[in-house]
Amino acid sequence: MDMESFDTEILQSLQILKKADDVTELRILDSPKGTVSGYFDDIQSLAENALDYNGKAQIYITLNPVNPALLARSSNQVKFRPKQTTSDSDILKRNWLQIDFDPVRPSGISSSDSEHKDSLLKAKTVKAALKELGWPDPIIASSGNGAHLLYCIDLPNNEEMTELVKNVLYSLDFSYSDNNVEVDRTTFNAARIWKLYGTIACKGDNTDERPHRQSKIIKYPDVLKLVTLEQLKALAKEYPSIQAPTKRLRKGESPNTSVHDMESWLDSHNLVYTKGRWQNKATKYVLHSCPWNESHSNKSAYVLKFDDGGIAAGCHHNSCSKENWNTLRNKLEPNWRSNHQLDSKDGNEEKQASVLIRLASNAQYFSNELEECFAAIMSVNGNQILKLKSKKFKLWLTKLFFEETGRPPSSDAMNQALNVLEMKALLEGEQHSLNLRVSEKNNSFYYDLGNDSWETVKVTSNGCTIQSDTPLLFYRTKNTKAQLTPNFEGNIELLLNHVLLKDREEQILFLVYVVSCFVPNIPHTILVLSGEKGAAKSTTMRMVRSIIDPAIRDLLAMPNSIQDLALILSSNYMPCFDNLDTLSAEKSDLLCTAVTGGGISKRTLFTDDEETILSFMRCVGLNGINVVATRSDLLDRSLILDLQRIDETDRKEEREVWSDFDKDKPSILGGALNILSKAMAIYPTVKLDKLARMADFTRWGYAIAEAAGWGGNVFLEAYFNNINKSNDEAISSNPVAAAVKALMRSRPSWSGSVTQLLEALNKVSERELIDTHSKYWPKGPNILSRRLKEVLSNLKSIGISFDIRHGGDSKIVNISNSRYQKLSSSISRPVQE
């Protein structure tokens, strides 16, 4: 086919899919120059640019209309390696329901002729089924490797409609995907790119067995009618709510209690319509009709055989909501329980504790480094990790027992069973290090989304992916809240639309801090927000926590006791303390421990010698009108940011503030994780001449700023300026440091005993109005030595250093000021006090 014919095919497809005023992104992947992108409102120009890469790269467009403002990025032309492409928030509305039928084959290669034919046949099967439900005719197309159905819709682009489209695709996948062709469940996002019809699909090499083919529209209806919202909702409801398996096979278990050959068992009852894999964790059998209600004939019933032996069954109709695998066997094999039910009358009763242990045996039991015991429970939604002493684990075990026996277990039996399971976890199980929210394994970072499916984001130097089958890495607390699904093509700088920071330097520090919080197993700086009333300190802190560690209680009050503070730190990855005025020395020290890694121990309740250890490494947030971190150790670990007061003309209602933020949040989160992925590739190469006290944050911050395009050196300058500001704050808030600074203001050195120094500092403090009634002011020479050592690093940063040595009957202090400059000869040198 010549270039003119390709041009005609491309133009014809664009005329079918696009309205005259639509703006479309052309995105070209895997070109010799990397990703290529441009925005077009001229389809002729779009087609010409696409032709330059036809047969050399993968060519896609955005189907749904893009915000016309994006033309400013590259108007009717393409750019190489763009910093930004279209995100979901850039889509004006949803015009298309995109259904992709992908042949099952190894990745990175074209489909064979038979695989391509199978996908087209599957598309026609689904089209016919939807036609029976009253759906209009769609566009039928070939992607070159698989098949497409495009249905015309008219929906707003919001979170509710995204979830609706997602459930529609999940429903189609569940009912029609098999071992040969799968319905792609990932095409639900509004900014999804789509094959530009008329171009060549060129995955892998062009071979006789797997040739490159031209994508094209195969059939286009004379009248393209809309699928209604009601039709979409009806189909979405057909995605079943999968109940967790009620039974799992034990090694050597009798076939009287479980079905080993599921396929033969189903065939013997003539139930199966189609078979396929489900979410890479189970074999799915869609049934011809519902065994509980024969009127449900729309492929609504199913059986799932999980890879670990668990079995689930059900029907998506509401009237069958209580049906499961046990009720299916009860219906088809009424006497299946007879060989294993508990029967105390015939003397063969298993003790309840033994039954509980047997039912719980399919979970994986392990401990962490603190010898806390856990169970990893496999469910249809992934690994669920529960503490053995938690109420939720006991309820799970009670549920299994009740489903097996029809009665609840006794409390004695439950306690006996828990003791045995705890033994298995501690003495027989492996040891795993569990974390809140972020973790690391095999050079990959993981971020727990906290949802019921136990999904995580896996972050590597090659990108970000969402996974449901995650290693044993996380535990959750009662305060853990689910995170939204991130948009990895988003932009973290959208966060600046919701935060009032004074200058670009502080904005970069703030954004770097947010990204750094997703790095596991490093000390994190303490975020200290200050500002006058009306600067939205609390709201900003809540937004930051919502991005990093969503919580049911996002802002916390500082507790009175150290033990309670330790409990909060152990239960929250990002504990944020609101509206603080002061911090005691003990709490300040514990916060220092929390960010660099440590813990606290206490006696276990109701025991004499058992010890409970609370361990943590956390991202801590503090806010107040003034800088609440005043002790030098805490300030050294802090990032202090001043927020501007919101002008009265710019104030919004709370509902509007959070509505705007929630709209941007998926893009902010995805953008942050995407920057982290790029930073992971840069970090090993980062070599810095000097590191701040928070060395890990310094080096990671440089890599993050480089990855984001802000500049590593720009970050370093901003961070060291912030450290200087923190140091000034540490000196001004510490009466001893402030007095020493005042004493050395106009002299190069001072020498004398500790007693003489205290006398000199008392005189200086009286002159400088420094508060000597503060509890931090030394009342005697022995206390002064200790106070001086506390501010040693802060004073050294402004050129003042000292040493304390024994000199006969007293300690001698020698102080030097390296930044002293000689005054003009007209000013006499001060006499030593």
Image (cartoon, helix red, strand yellow):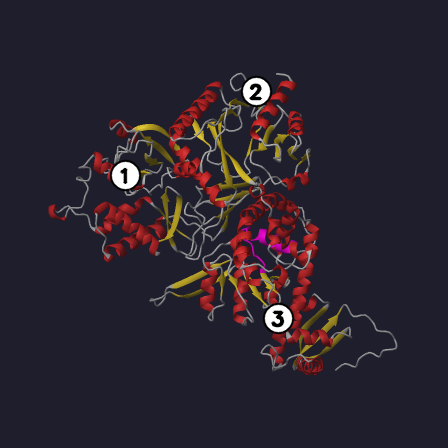
**In this rendering, position of residue 43 left or right of residue 419:** right
Residue at figure coordinates x 23%, y 36% from the top left: 329
- Residue farthest to the left, as pictured: 345
Give the amino acid at mark 3: Glu
Question: On the rendered structure, is 174 left or right of 776?
Answer: left
Could you say whether the residue bearing mark 3 is in a helix, strand or loop? helix
Specify few, some or many for label 1: CA neighbours under 10 Å numbering under 14, 14-19, or 20 or more. many
Task: Determine the image quadrant of residue 191.
Answer: top right
22 over 714 or under it: above or below: above
How far across and down, in percent of the image, does residue 603 sit?
Answer: 39, 66
Residue 431 vertical placement versus 652 (above, below): above
Q: Name the residue rendered at 43%, 41% in the picture.
A: 469
Q: Are marks 2 and 3 in contact (CB under 8 Å)?
A: no
Instruction: List the residue tagged with mark 3.
Output: 790
2 or 3: mark nearer the eye: 2
Give me the C-alpha separation between circle 1 and circle 3.
67 Å
| Residue denoted by label 1 | 325
The answer to the question of whether label 1 and label 3 lie on touching residues, with beta carbons closer than 8 A, is no
Callout 2: SS: loop
Q: Is residue 523 magenta?
A: yes
What's the magenta region?
508-526
